[in-house]
Amino acid sequence: MKQATSIKALWVVVIILLIANIFWGGVFLLKLKERKHHRHDRGSFMERRLGLSEQQKGKFEEFRTEHLAEINPIYDELRTKRKALYNFKSIDSDSLIKQQLLGEISALHQKTERLKLEHFKELNEVLDEDQSQQFERILKRAAGHGIPSKRLRKKRH
Protein backbone atom coordinates (compact mmCIF):
# COMPACT_ATOMS: atom_id res chain seq x y z
CA MET A 1 0.00 0.00 0.00
CA LYS A 2 2.78 2.38 0.94
CA GLN A 3 4.62 1.42 -2.20
CA ALA A 4 1.57 2.16 -4.41
CA THR A 5 1.19 5.60 -2.79
CA SER A 6 4.90 6.30 -3.33
CA ILE A 7 4.63 5.34 -7.00
CA LYS A 8 1.56 7.57 -7.48
CA ALA A 9 3.36 10.47 -5.79
CA LEU A 10 6.38 9.88 -8.00
CA TRP A 11 4.17 9.95 -11.12
CA VAL A 12 2.57 13.20 -9.98
CA VAL A 13 6.02 14.77 -9.51
CA VAL A 14 7.17 13.51 -12.92
CA ILE A 15 4.06 14.94 -14.63
CA ILE A 16 4.45 18.30 -12.86
CA LEU A 17 8.12 18.47 -13.87
CA LEU A 18 7.25 17.54 -17.44
CA ILE A 19 4.62 20.29 -17.66
CA ALA A 20 7.02 22.83 -16.14
CA ASN A 21 9.73 21.76 -18.58
CA ILE A 22 7.41 22.15 -21.57
CA PHE A 23 6.26 25.57 -20.33
CA TRP A 24 9.76 26.94 -19.72
CA GLY A 25 11.03 25.44 -22.98
CA GLY A 26 8.27 27.28 -24.83
CA VAL A 27 9.11 30.53 -23.06
CA PHE A 28 12.78 30.07 -23.95
CA LEU A 29 11.99 29.41 -27.62
CA LEU A 30 9.77 32.49 -27.80
CA LYS A 31 12.51 34.65 -26.30
CA LEU A 32 15.05 33.20 -28.72
CA LYS A 33 12.77 33.88 -31.68
CA GLU A 34 12.16 37.44 -30.43
CA ARG A 35 15.90 38.01 -30.05
CA LYS A 36 16.61 36.82 -33.61
CA HIS A 37 13.87 39.12 -34.90
CA HIS A 38 15.41 42.13 -33.17
CA ARG A 39 18.85 41.33 -34.52
CA HIS A 40 17.63 41.90 -38.08
CA ASP A 41 15.65 44.99 -37.16
CA ARG A 42 18.53 47.44 -36.80
CA GLY A 43 16.99 50.02 -39.10
CA SER A 44 13.95 50.55 -36.91
CA PHE A 45 16.23 50.65 -33.85
CA MET A 46 18.04 53.64 -35.35
CA GLU A 47 14.76 55.24 -36.36
CA ARG A 48 13.46 54.98 -32.80
CA ARG A 49 16.67 56.01 -31.06
CA LEU A 50 17.34 58.97 -33.34
CA GLY A 51 13.72 60.05 -33.80
CA LEU A 52 14.03 60.21 -37.59
CA SER A 53 11.56 62.11 -39.73
CA GLU A 54 9.88 60.34 -42.66
CA GLN A 55 12.31 62.02 -45.07
CA GLN A 56 15.30 60.89 -42.99
CA LYS A 57 13.89 57.34 -42.81
CA GLY A 58 13.66 57.28 -46.60
CA LYS A 59 17.25 58.48 -46.97
CA PHE A 60 18.49 55.96 -44.38
CA GLU A 61 16.77 53.11 -46.23
CA GLU A 62 18.16 54.32 -49.56
CA PHE A 63 21.71 54.52 -48.14
CA ARG A 64 21.31 51.15 -46.42
CA THR A 65 20.22 49.45 -49.65
CA GLU A 66 23.16 50.94 -51.56
CA HIS A 67 25.58 50.01 -48.77
CA LEU A 68 24.38 46.39 -48.59
CA ALA A 69 24.59 46.02 -52.37
CA GLU A 70 28.21 47.16 -52.16
CA ILE A 71 29.34 45.31 -49.04
CA ASN A 72 27.53 41.93 -49.28
CA PRO A 73 29.65 40.68 -52.21
CA ILE A 74 32.76 41.48 -50.14
CA TYR A 75 31.37 39.46 -47.22
CA ASP A 76 30.70 36.59 -49.62
CA GLU A 77 34.28 36.78 -50.85
CA LEU A 78 35.54 36.86 -47.24
CA ARG A 79 33.58 33.68 -46.43
CA THR A 80 35.01 31.96 -49.50
CA LYS A 81 38.57 32.94 -48.59
CA ARG A 82 38.11 31.83 -44.96
CA LYS A 83 36.80 28.45 -46.10
CA ALA A 84 39.79 28.07 -48.40
CA LEU A 85 42.13 29.04 -45.57
CA TYR A 86 40.71 26.43 -43.19
CA ASN A 87 40.50 23.68 -45.80
CA PHE A 88 44.21 22.99 -45.48
CA LYS A 89 45.12 19.58 -44.05
CA SER A 90 47.47 21.11 -41.53
CA ILE A 91 46.51 24.39 -39.94
CA ASP A 92 50.08 24.71 -38.66
CA SER A 93 51.62 24.65 -42.12
CA ASP A 94 53.09 27.99 -43.11
CA SER A 95 52.59 27.76 -46.86
CA LEU A 96 52.80 30.60 -49.33
CA ILE A 97 49.15 30.06 -50.29
CA LYS A 98 48.03 30.48 -46.67
CA GLN A 99 50.03 33.68 -46.35
CA GLN A 100 48.48 34.98 -49.54
CA LEU A 101 44.97 34.12 -48.32
CA LEU A 102 45.63 35.83 -44.99
CA GLY A 103 46.75 38.95 -46.84
CA GLU A 104 43.65 38.91 -49.04
CA ILE A 105 41.38 38.42 -46.02
CA SER A 106 43.07 41.32 -44.26
CA ALA A 107 42.64 43.56 -47.32
CA LEU A 108 38.95 42.63 -47.54
CA HIS A 109 38.45 43.43 -43.85
CA GLN A 110 40.03 46.83 -44.39
CA LYS A 111 37.75 47.42 -47.35
CA THR A 112 34.62 46.55 -45.33
CA GLU A 113 35.68 48.85 -42.50
CA ARG A 114 36.32 51.68 -44.95
CA LEU A 115 32.91 51.13 -46.57
CA LYS A 116 31.21 51.10 -43.15
CA LEU A 117 32.88 54.38 -42.19
CA GLU A 118 31.80 55.96 -45.48
CA HIS A 119 28.26 54.66 -44.90
CA PHE A 120 28.14 56.08 -41.38
CA LYS A 121 29.44 59.44 -42.66
CA GLU A 122 26.73 59.44 -45.32
CA LEU A 123 24.04 58.64 -42.72
CA ASN A 124 25.37 61.32 -40.38
CA GLU A 125 25.01 64.00 -43.07
CA VAL A 126 21.21 63.48 -43.00
CA LEU A 127 20.95 64.07 -39.23
CA ASP A 128 20.52 67.27 -37.25
CA GLU A 129 22.97 68.17 -34.45
CA ASP A 130 21.20 66.30 -31.61
CA GLN A 131 20.64 63.22 -33.76
CA SER A 132 24.26 63.33 -34.87
CA GLN A 133 25.49 63.29 -31.28
CA GLN A 134 23.19 60.39 -30.42
CA PHE A 135 24.33 58.54 -33.56
CA GLU A 136 27.96 59.00 -32.52
CA ARG A 137 27.21 57.56 -29.05
CA ILE A 138 25.49 54.54 -30.64
CA LEU A 139 28.47 53.94 -32.94
CA LYS A 140 30.95 54.20 -30.08
CA ARG A 141 29.01 51.59 -28.09
CA ALA A 142 28.70 49.33 -31.12
CA ALA A 143 32.43 49.63 -31.92
CA GLY A 144 33.31 47.68 -28.77
CA HIS A 145 31.11 44.68 -29.59
CA GLY A 146 33.00 41.53 -30.49
CA ILE A 147 36.17 42.70 -28.78
CA PRO A 148 36.88 40.92 -25.49
CA SER A 149 37.10 43.23 -22.49
CA LYS A 150 40.44 43.74 -20.76
CA ARG A 151 39.19 41.60 -17.88
CA LEU A 152 38.48 38.65 -20.21
CA ARG A 153 41.78 39.01 -22.06
CA LYS A 154 43.69 38.78 -18.79
CA LYS A 155 41.87 35.56 -17.80
CA ARG A 156 42.83 33.82 -21.04
CA HIS A 157 46.56 34.29 -20.53
Image (cartoon, rainbow, N blue to C red):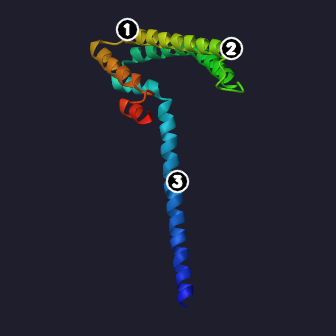
Q: Which of marks 2 and 3 is in front?
A: 2
Tell me which numbered mark, 2 or 1, is placed earlier along the sequence.
2
Examine the image and state in which quarter residue 42 appears: top left
* Residue 21 point in image, percent of width and height: 52, 59
Helix, strand or loop status at disc 2: helix
Please, which residue is most extreme toward the right here?
89
Helix, strand or loop status at disc 3: helix
* Residue 122 point in image, percent of width and height: 42, 9
Q: Which amino acid, mark 2?
A: Ile
Q: Give the Cα separation between the discs numbered 2 and 1.
A: 42 Å
* Residue matched to label 1: 125
Instruction: Residue at 51%, 66% (x, y): give it.
Output: 17
**As displayed, is residue 10 above or below residue 98?**
below
Q: Which of marks 2 and 1 is in front?
A: 2
Residue 137 in the figure: left or right of residue 29 = left
Q: Which amino acid, mark 3?
A: Gly
Q: Give the Cα separation between the discs numbered 2 and 3.
A: 47 Å
* Residue matched to label 2: 97
Neighbours of disc 3 within 10 Å: few (<14), some (14-19), many (20+):
few
Instruction: Residue at 37%, 8% (x, y): give it.
Output: 125
**As displayed, is residue 22 above or below residue 1?**
above
Please, which residue is most extreme toward the bottom here?
1
* Residue 35 point in image, percent of width and height: 48, 38
* Residue matched to label 3: 25
Residue 51 visible at all: no
Tell me which numbered mark, 2 or 3, is placed earlier along the sequence.
3
Residue 146 visible at all: yes
Position of the C terminus by quadrant: top left
Q: Do the residues labelled 2 and 3 touch (CB within 8 Å)?
A: no
Which one is in front, 83 or 137?
83
Q: Are marks 2 and 1 in contact (CB under 8 Å)?
A: no
